[in-house]
Every structure is written in structure tokens, then in C-alpha cells.
Image (cartoon, grey):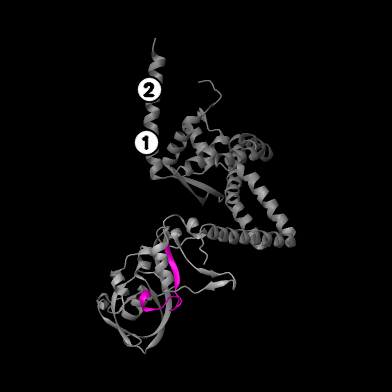
């Protein structure tokens, strides 16, 4: 550490020193030349000549001050002195220096982590337009103190009955064997998601379209949407994939759309198939657990978040 | 002419004197002061205390540059030389000075 301090202090002084050594050399030359001239032209003794030359030149120190002031560096004297004193103290007590530097580093780290956490907690927002209005709905089982599963029936009920919420979407993650061109079938995580979830995020597809409610009907032709990263890596970003068939599990799906770069709603998903949200197909309370995850409240998040429904 | 105390070069005219002297040949500080004295027949004396600050000021303004050289008697000296900008400035300062001198002259001639 100390060599850094030394180097910094030296660098700062270097510019000044070179200017001053030049100044010294110039004034010495001037005095010598003047002395020579006086000896030569006025036949003075060298000592007397030198004295006269010095008097004529004036106090050398005085010139130095003038020159320094001329360079606008007078303030530097005091500042560098302070700096050098500070650095010297740091060097003299290396233990104290280490403790102080570590202490400051810790304090900065803690403060920045705290600030980040508090700002995220105080103002949670998803990276979408008006992302702070997207909230999740969960059913909480107070006896088990755990999340109770929500089903398609809940989704339909909420859609019809929640007035403070503009749109309700839902998804669940499923795994399917995906047969991509030129590769072995591999199981991948897909989001089975309602069309409304795309409206909630307000992100337009890069190519093609996203799901419409017709896609959610039982018996509708199966469709799939791809994320940008998957599209680039597996389809070379080929725009003609729209309309092509992709086999997921045992079903052929038509590729209908590509979402833009970075889109991974709800949780880093890169493939989406429609969620068949048909409550009449299943008895009440039955069906897969879906996460009603994506709702756009009509008011900022606070209002919707604090509401709870008991059942 | 009776010997008179040499006049200090006026502060405003010092730059002009330095530039003019350097326009003849590159020179070190002492040489400049000697040359001014010689040319003016000892009537003008460059105050040595203001010569070096003036040189530094002119160098900072880019009108002159300097480099180390050796004098006739083998001493290391800083030689100053006029830059192109310095030559232009000299022309302008000369014109200014002549205008000023003519004006002063006209006023002083008024009877």
C-alpha cells in the first residue's frame, strides 16, 4: 500500500519539481552570465560582480514565488502538504489504515445491500410497463400455514368476481419432450399459460401473434410460442418458423409467435402453450394446481396486495 | 546626451520587446535582457524580476517555445524561440503599439 501512496505523492510533486529545477537553472545561468559580463565590461572583482548580479536579479526565492503564482499553483503548496501529511500518517500506522479501510468497505457494502433490499421490498415491480401493478394471488391455508393449491375453478371465479383487478392470468410449469430439428428429443420446461398473461405484461410478440382466447378452448388446434433465446439458438433466428410444426410430447403444435429478447415471463420460460382453462371439464376443486400469478390490479400494487379473501 | 537612469520597460511593452527580440534569433533569458539594453542604447532595461515570469506566460500562451541548449561558453541554457502564433501576435502587437504611440504623439503635439 505504502508504495502507492508514495508514488501518488511523488507524481504530484514531479510536475512542480521539474518546473522549479528549470527555474533554478535558468536563474543560476542568468546570474553567472551577468557576473561574467560585469567582470569583463566593468573590470569588477568576481565576488563583487557576483554580488551586484545577485542584487540586480533580486531575491531568487521571490522570483520563485512569482513564477509559482503565475502558474496558479500557489494553492497546491498547502494542499500537497496536507495530502503528504495524511499519507504519511496512514503509512506510519499500517494497522490502523487496514482497519479503517476495511471498516469503510464493510460499511459501504452493508449500506448498499440494505438500500437495494429496502428499495426492492418497498417498491416491488416487474420489469414491464406499470410492472408495479402486476401482483400474484394465492390461497393461504391458515391451518397448515402454507399455500393451498388454486385450480381452474378459482381462476374463473376470480376472473368473474374480482372487481379491483383488470385481468387475471394463470400458468403452470409442465415438462414435455421437445423434438427440435436436428437434435434428440429432450424434456424441457414449458409454461402452460393463459392468453391474458401476455396482455398483462403488455409486451408485443417479436414475430407472429400470441395466444388468443380461442386457443384455450378444448379442441382448439395446439399452438406454441417460443422465446427469443430459444429461437436464436435452435432455429438460427429463422423468421419462417412461424407456422411450422413442433412436436411436443405426442402432440404436434404449430409455432405461432416469437417473444422478444429477454422475455421470460413468468419465470425464465422460453416456450409457452395455452392453458386450457375450462372449468366445465373438471369437477369443482379438481384439476392441476395452477399459479394465478399474473394479475393487473386497477390500482397500484398496495391496494390489491392488502386485500385478502377468506374461505 | 547626459547619462540618464534607464527606464524600466513598461509592463505592457515587455511582451512586445521579448517577442521582437526573439523574432531575430532564439535566445536565452539573459541574452534577451542584454539585447534589449543594447538595441535601446541602454535606455531600456528589462526588469529581470519580470522577465522570467513573462517568458513563462508567453510560453504558456503558445507564443514561444523553449528547449535546452548550450551557450558559446558551454553552459546549459534554456533557449526560447518564437512560434508561428508568436510571430502573428508580434505583428498585431506591433500594430497596436504603433497606433497607441501615434495617438499619444498626436495628443502630446497639441499646442
The residue tagged 1 is: B91
In the depicted view, which residue is nearer to us: A210 or B74?
Answer: A210
Magenta segment includes A286:
yes
Residue for point 41% across, 78% down: A283
Q: Earlier in the sequence, mark 1 or mark 2?
A: 1
In the depicted view, which residue is nearer to us: B52 or A276?
Answer: A276
Q: Left or right of A230: which side holds B77?
A: right
Q: CA distance from mark 1 to mark 2?
A: 16 Å
Quadrant of the rendering where the N terminus of chain A is positioned: bottom right
**Residue range corresponding to the magenta coloring:** A272-295
| Image coords of residue A172 (percent x, y) | 43, 76
Q: Indicate the chain on which mark 2 is placed.
A: B
Q: Indicate the chain on which mark 1 is placed.
A: B
Q: Categorize mark 2 by other alpha carbons within 10 Å: few (<14), some (14-19), many (20+).
A: few
Residue for point 39% across, 14% down: B109
**Which residue of the protein is positioned furthest toward the top in this rendering?**
B111
Q: Categorize mark 1 by other alpha carbons within 10 Å: few (<14), some (14-19), many (20+).
A: some
Residue for point 44% across, 38% down: B19
Instruction: Identify the image quadrant of residue A194.
Output: bottom left
Magenta segment includes B63:
no
Q: Is residue A168 above or below residue A225?
A: above
Dot 2 falls on a residue whose secondary structure is helix
Q: Left or right of B80: which side holds A35?
A: right
Q: Are marks 1 and 2 on the same chain?
A: yes
Does residue B41 appear in the picture of this structure?
no
Q: Is residue A187 above or below residue A82?
A: below
The residue tagged 2 is: B102
| Image coords of residue B88 (percent x, y) | 37, 39
Q: Is residue B111 above or below residue B91?
A: above
Amino acid at each position: 500500500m505504502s508504495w502507492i501512496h508514495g508514488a501518488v505523492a511523488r507524481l504530484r510533486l514531479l510536475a512542480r519539481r521539474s518546473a522549479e529545477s528549470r527555474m533554478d537553472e535558468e536563474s543560476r545561468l542568468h546570474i553567472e552570465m551577468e557576473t561574467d559580463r560585469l567582470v569583463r565590461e566593468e573590470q569588477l572583482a568576481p565576488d563583487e560582480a557576483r554580488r551586484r548580479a545577485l542584487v540586480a536579479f533580486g531575491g531568487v526565492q521571490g522570483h520563485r514565488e512569482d513564477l509559482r503564482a503565475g502558474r496558479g499553483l500557489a494553492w497546491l503548496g498547502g494542499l500537497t502538504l496536507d495530502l503528504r501529511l495524511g499519507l504519511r500518517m496512514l503509512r506510519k500506522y499500517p494497522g490502523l489504515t487496514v482497519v479503517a479501510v476495511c471498516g469503510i468497505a464493510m460499511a459501504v457494502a452493508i449500506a448498499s445491500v440494505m438500500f437495494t433490499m429496502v428499495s426492492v421490498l418497498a417498491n416491488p415491480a416487474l420489469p414491464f410497463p406499470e410492472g408495479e401493478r402486476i401482483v400474484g394471488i394465492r390461497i393461504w391455508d391458515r391451518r397448515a400455514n402454507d399455500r393451498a393449491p388454486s385450480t381452474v375453478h378459482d381462476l374463473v371465479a376470480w376472473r368473474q368476481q374480482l372487481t379491483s383487478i383488470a385481468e387475471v392470468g394463470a400458468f403452470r410449469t409442465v415438462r414435455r419432450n421437445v423434438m427440435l430439428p436436428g437434435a434428440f428429443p429432450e424434456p424441457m420446461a414449458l409454461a402452460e399459460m393463459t392468453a391474458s398473461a401476455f396482455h398483462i405484461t403488455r409486451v408485443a410478440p417479436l414475430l407472429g401473434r400470441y395466444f388468443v382466447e380461442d386457443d384455450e378452448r378444448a379442441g382448439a388446434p395446439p399452438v406454441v410460442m417460443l422465446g427469443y433465446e430459444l429461437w436464436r439458438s435452435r432455429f438460427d433466428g429463422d423468421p419462417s418458423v412461424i407456422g411450422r410444426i413442433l412436436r411436443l410430447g405426442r402432440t404436434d403444435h404449430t409455432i405461432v409467435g416469437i417473444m422478444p429478447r429477454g422475455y421470460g415471463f413468468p419465470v425464465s420460460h422460453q416456450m409457452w402453450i395455452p392453458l386450457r382453462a375450462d372449468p366445465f371439464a373438471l369437477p369443482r376443486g379438481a384439476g392441476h394446481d395452477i399459479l394465478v400469478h399474473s394479475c393487473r390490479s386497477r390500482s397500484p400494487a398496495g391496494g390489491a396486495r392488502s386485500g385478502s379473501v377468506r374461505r | 546626451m547626459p547619462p540618464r537612469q534607464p527606464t524600466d520597460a513598461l509592463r505592457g511593452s515587455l511582451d512586445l520587446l521579448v517577442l521582437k527580440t526573439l523574432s531575430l534569433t532564439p535566445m536565452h533569458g539573459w541574452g534577451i535582457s542584454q539585447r534589449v539594453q543594447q538595441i535601446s542604447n541602454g535606455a531600456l532595461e528589462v526588469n529581470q524580476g519580470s522577465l522570467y515570469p513573462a517568458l513563462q506566460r508567453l510560453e504558456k500562451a503558445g507564443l514561444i517555445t523553449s528547449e535546452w541548449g548550450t551557450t558559446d561558453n558551454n553552459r546549459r541554457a534554456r533557449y526560447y524561440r518564437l512560434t508561428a502564433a508568436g510571430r502573428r501576435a508580434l505583428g498585431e502587437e506591433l500594430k497596436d503599439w504603433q497606433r497607441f504611440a501615434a495617438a499619444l504623439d498626436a495628443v502630446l503635439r497639441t499646442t
